[in-house]
Image (cartoon, rainbow, N blue to C red):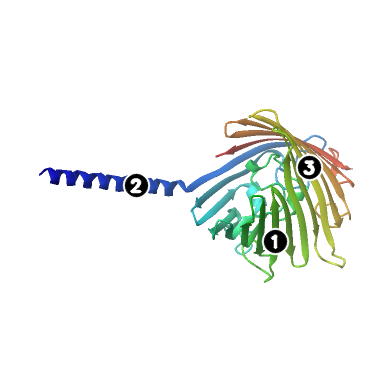
Amino acid sequence: MKKTKLSLLVLTFLMSINVFTQEEEKKEEEKKFSFSGSVDAYFRTNLNAPNDENAVAPGSSFANLPGFALGMANLVASYEGEKVGFVADLVYGPRGEDATFNSPFLRPGGSSNIVNQLYAYWNVSESVKLTIGNFNTFLGYEVISPSANFNYSTSYLFSYGPFSHTGLKADFTLSEKFSLMVAVMNPKDATEFNPTGNYAFGAQLGYADQFLNVLLDDGAFEIDFTGGFNLSETFFLGVNAALYDNGDDGDDKAGFAGVALYPQLAASDTFSIGLRAEYFVETEDFGAIGTGVEDSSIFATTLTANVKIGDLTIIPELRLDSGSDDFFFDDDLKAQKSLSSFVLAAVYSF
């Protein structure tokens, strides 16, 4: 009788361990799913130009609407497995629509313009990862989501490089400091499908958080350097430089070049201040700045503060764009070379 009771007790204990183990494994599986994102809104006003129906704005992307305006809601669902995973990154609102401007090409008015990123990946080994789908560009210092940028408005370099690619890329971890990425993708901005039958090729060589990027696209090429340096515990200097050529040797030859510096000082855990100083020039009539004048250039200085209140970041920003030609208009609608503006943004991340 005692042996029977002992056997039942052991069996019950083993069953309890098995149930507990299954519950723990289930919890671990559930933890691999994550849901994150951000919402943002802002107020923008010109200091030396109209703020009504004649309002003007810098020629860079995002944060260009007058008065109180919406940014976007960014919802990111992801699953990270030991070998495989996915990311579904959706955007709603004016900033999201601007970022996915060429997506609803196959079905105008369809749902593709809410897809910022949509990809799956396979960790082939500890040093090799394959990704297929739509992913944000590897070029440039800034990104689409305002929660990952220090400045709220964006640079000219970021605005006129590609935002996203659709294709297949392979990431290689070569050592503790060196990394390599190679990719084959649809042509620039063709994120929904390939409309031409041509393909673009990209590569990125990384060393200790410094990245040299190359994009080849049907004769056009862009070379880009993105990096940064921690000069002290509180002072960081970011750097971005790029050169683009459309590959045309005839009358349509055009391109751009530029460099931007991002010094940032963390005064405390809740307050930081930084500057973006950017020089951007278009070769021939690339059309980026929008004047129609060949070889136009612009120097843009943006003073930005970040005030953190929990998961909310308040971003006041003073920006001065000064051009080589009359790019802007004053209050009397007379052409002028400079534009000064102020933005107050709120970005909540979760």
Task: Using the image, tell me which numbered label, if any, was put on residue 261.
Answer: 3
- Under circle 1, the secondary element is strand
Question: Within 10 Å of the Cα at label 1, are there few (<14), some (14-19), or many (20+) other Cα atoms?
Answer: many
* Amino acid under disc 1: Gly
Q: Are marks 2 and 1 in contact (CB under 8 Å)?
A: no
Viewer-nearest residue: 206 or 255: 206
* Amino acid under disc 3: Leu
In the image: residue 340, left or right of residue 191: right
Viewer-nearest residue: 30 or 90: 30
Q: CA distance from mark 1 to mark 3?
A: 24 Å
Q: Is residue 309 above or below residue 2?
A: above
The tag earlier along the polypeptide, 2 or 1, is: 2
Find residue 53 and report its horizontal and vertical position in percent: 75, 42
Q: CA distance from mark 3 to mark 2?
A: 52 Å
Find residue 327 and report its horizontal and vertical position in percent: 85, 46
Q: Which residue is mark 2?
A: 21
Viewer-nearest residue: 116 or 268: 268
| Residue farthest front in this picture | 3
Q: Quadrant of the N terminus?
A: top left
Q: Is residue 232 above or below residue 3?
A: above
Q: Is residue 167 above or below residue 211?
A: below
The residue at the point 50 percent across, 57 percent down is: 83
* Amino acid under disc 2: Thr
In the image: residue 89, left or right of residue 219: left
How many discs mark residues in the rendered view?
Answer: 3
Task: Using the image, tell me which numbered label, if any, was put on residue 113.
Answer: none
Find residue 171 and report its horizontal and vertical position in percent: 62, 58
The tag earlier along the polypeptide, 1 or 3, is: 1
- Under circle 2, the secondary element is helix
Viewer-nearest residue: 55 or 118: 118
- Under circle 3, the secondary element is strand
Q: Which residue is mark 1?
A: 202
